[in-house]
Amino acid sequence: MSIPSKYDANSAENKWYDYWMKHNYFHSEPDEREPYTIVIPPPNVTGVLHMGHMLNNTIQDVLIRRARLKGMNACWVPGTDHASIATEAKVVARLKEKGINKKDITREEFLKHAWDWTHEYGGVILDQLKKLGCSCDWDRTKFTMDEDMSASVIKVFVDLYKKGLIYRGYRMVNWDPEAKTTLSDEEVIYEERQGHLYYLSYPIEGSDEKVTIATTRPETILGDTAICINPNDERYTHLKGKKAIVPICNRVIPIIEDEYVDVEFGTGCLKVTPAHDENDKNLGDKHDLEVVDIFNEDATLNSYGLHYEGKDRFVVRKEIVKELEEKGFLVKTENHLNKVGTSERTKAVIEPRLSDQWFLKMEALAKPALEAVLGDEKEINLFPKKFENTYRHWMENIRDWNISRQLWWGQQIPAYYYGDGKEDFVVAETIEEALKLAQDKTGNAALKGDDLRQDEDALDTWFSSWLWPMSVFGGVLNPENEEYKYYYPTSDLVTGPDILFFWVARMIMAGYEFEGKKPFTNVYLTGLVRDKQRRKMSKSLGNSPDALELIKDFGADGVRVGLLLSSAAGNDLLFDESLCQQGKNFANKIWNAFRLVKGWEVSEAIEQPEASKVAIEWYQAKFNQTLNEIEDHFSKYRISDALMATYKLVWDDFCSWLLEMVKPAYQKPIDAQTFRSVIKFLEDNLRILHPFMPFLTEEIWQHIEERSEDQALIIAEWPKQEAVNVDLINEFAFAAEVVSGIRTIRKEKNIPFKDELALSVLNNEKVSAKFDAVIAKLGNIEALSYVEDKVEGALSFRIKSNEYFIPVSGAINVEEEIEKLETELKYTEGFLKSVRGKLSNDKFVSGAPEKVVAMERKKEADAVAKIATIKESLASLK
């Protein structure tokens, strides 16, 4: 098979992905092997690939490919989420373009349009993941609105209702006026915004007196039903039992007393609007106040808004302030910084609203989920650990989950009404079951299916995705099925910390509630992808690159490497396109190294040179050491560190050192024994590189020799960990410094590499001669000898207390040598001072790992030895 001069990422990616798919390498079925299972965090069905998806799915693919190489039965389940709010908004917008109003069509007609939209745009993101190289089991692709998935959701709702955990209640909820639906507390993002505090005067009925209140929302005065004072506030004692008149609407309202009022805020007098503030609603319930709702569902004012009816709340705010000022009710205005709740989906400002909604009691569900992550018998691990505190805080302060949404796209709530009363409903999985329950409840056997009316609301999207690890394997509908028992609990979950509560915590709760066990063992929370200015990537800022364009420009492997090399800022990643170029350069480096090796002529007749023999011993030790590091990084989910260790091994140790050490002389063959070892090392490198760079590695693997389909790299065997010869590694590190010293002298004195040199060694360090052949080859040393004393008139360099002498023709410039030595002495003394500074710090010595402290002590000893040698050399020259 001829080897192209350049690596063509585009053709390799298409070729090998098709090959993997054709041979079904991604597919998993239960067998006798240990399962390794990941379920994808389902992206929105109509979404497109962004940098967060790229990072998240690259990490999942790295983990799944590594598990496959380790001989596990790797199963990565892909799928998409129906995303009620986002998808419904897009369908409504499309209908509007066609001149169709959602209110003018039936639910069935709307759902047909929604399914059309889903079939047209759904799955685009999954196709894009294939371009990235994601090795998902595409045969298992699930959608949260699939028939079996929806049936699972309905079954769970009914089960929880029967257990008394789901209830219907008239509560103050978070209303999104743009999506026209309620949201759970977790879907509200609080932002600090600069606003105003308006001081308004309310006339006291039957007198000329006025009382002043402060509000940030003057438009809501039209819904005021009381003024509240603190009974301990002497300023307002005289107002007890009196009534006030609301400006503009002239509603007469009582002045009530309650210690809830903060006497320090504003004027110490509070306007009470029970329909538009949760705390006001609590006061209203306590004091039996009237509830006046002034808003329509889109946050325009209704008939209670008087002449402002039909206008948006923020328009009314400006206009009513002007009217209040003109009529003498506005006392003053102050700047005021306050927290404003906004919708996580639409970014609209949330409106507190009273509404009949469905809720799930969370307190009992939270307890086992809290214990699983933070208890003594910890069953679930969060990486990084810092998120444990965030998790604890949220779980210990959990509130009931508002699970109903005023939407049509989603699973319709299985509650059926047979009358007008609030309790005139039954909950069942089918209308047939509902009819029987309704007949039994009413004692009316004549009731028919047509007499029942199903609840209009849909369930929160998260109410389907919290079942994801169970429902994708049919575990809700058929918990005894073979696949569910084999793949559940899943192994690892990779997701963003922004959905730790939305999704991760709820999946844990569902796992313990319905299955009595954890849904996964490890949760790796990736950081947010930010640009190099640390700004979050977003379409609005225009700082988020097109994912597919990046793949086109740098290759999928280059982009994967670029993402994982991004430097961590806290837990976030600073992404720079130049890192993708670095990834592409790495791919080219490996390709060129492979071409170099395959270009050598191989001879069985040549004896293995000593330099090659020791080089192969060293690389095996170095590979074993790096493999141990990589395994350690993976165990701690330090994926970027695992890549960096692999990167250094391949670029520095294999390409830059090993190949130089074993390379045959120009136009000469290489001995077969060395060649076979180099090929073995190349294959081992490809195995550990494959999870990060699947396309390049498979391309080279298949070029090394003809392979059958059961010998593909994707299903090859991960290298086994072996004992590490640390002494050999340390000896080579010393030898590498010697080679570097020789090359520095050649460069400084402009001595061509083809000119052979002699090297004399004053071996104070008692270094082994094992790597002498390597030093001779890489330094083009004709003769290497050990001496008992300094060689006069030769150029020299020092490593620790060892001195190396190279005689060169021409006189030595003594002044130049002294200056060079003094510069080296100054640097080494400065280095020694900084090391001793660390070692004199008790906090460092007692707190740092033993290995780190030992390394610093070794640096100190080496520096002391080197200083002594330099001083000796200086003394001999002066």
Image (tube, rainbow, N blue to C red):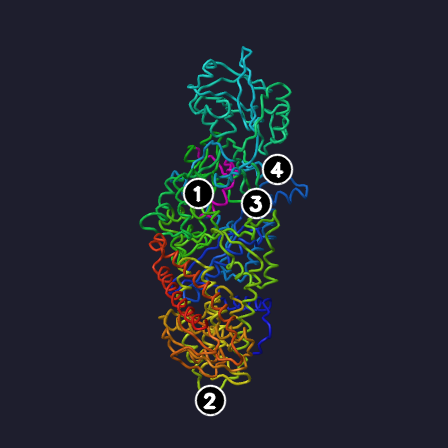
836 vs 394: above or below:
below
Which mark is on residue 86?
3
Label 3: how many residues lie within 10 Å, few (<14), some (14-19) or many (20+)? some
Whether pointer 2 and pointer 4 mark residues with C-beta atoms closer than 8 Å, the reply is no
Q: Which residues are magenta?
A: 444-466
Q: Which mark is residue 103?
A: 4
Q: Assess whether mark 3 and mark 4 are in contact (beta carbons under 8 angstroms).
A: no
Of marks 4 and 1, which one's residue comes earlier in the chain? 4
* Lateral position of residue 276 relative to residue 630, left or right: right
Residue denoted by label 1: 157
Q: Give, as a three-letter code, the residue at label 2.
A: Ala
Marks 3/1: CA distance?
Answer: 23 Å
Residue carrying label 2: 605
Q: Label 3 sits on what residue type?
A: Ala
Q: Residue furthest left?
A: 376
Residue 511 location (% of width, % of height) = 39, 49
The amino acid on which the numbered mark 1 sits, given as a three-letter code, is Phe
Residue 34 is situated, as x and y percent measured from the top left of the image, at 38, 63
Q: Earlier in the sequence, mark 3 or mark 1?
A: 3
Q: CA distance from mark 1 to mark 2?
A: 76 Å
Q: Nearer the viewer, mark 2 or mark 4?
A: 2
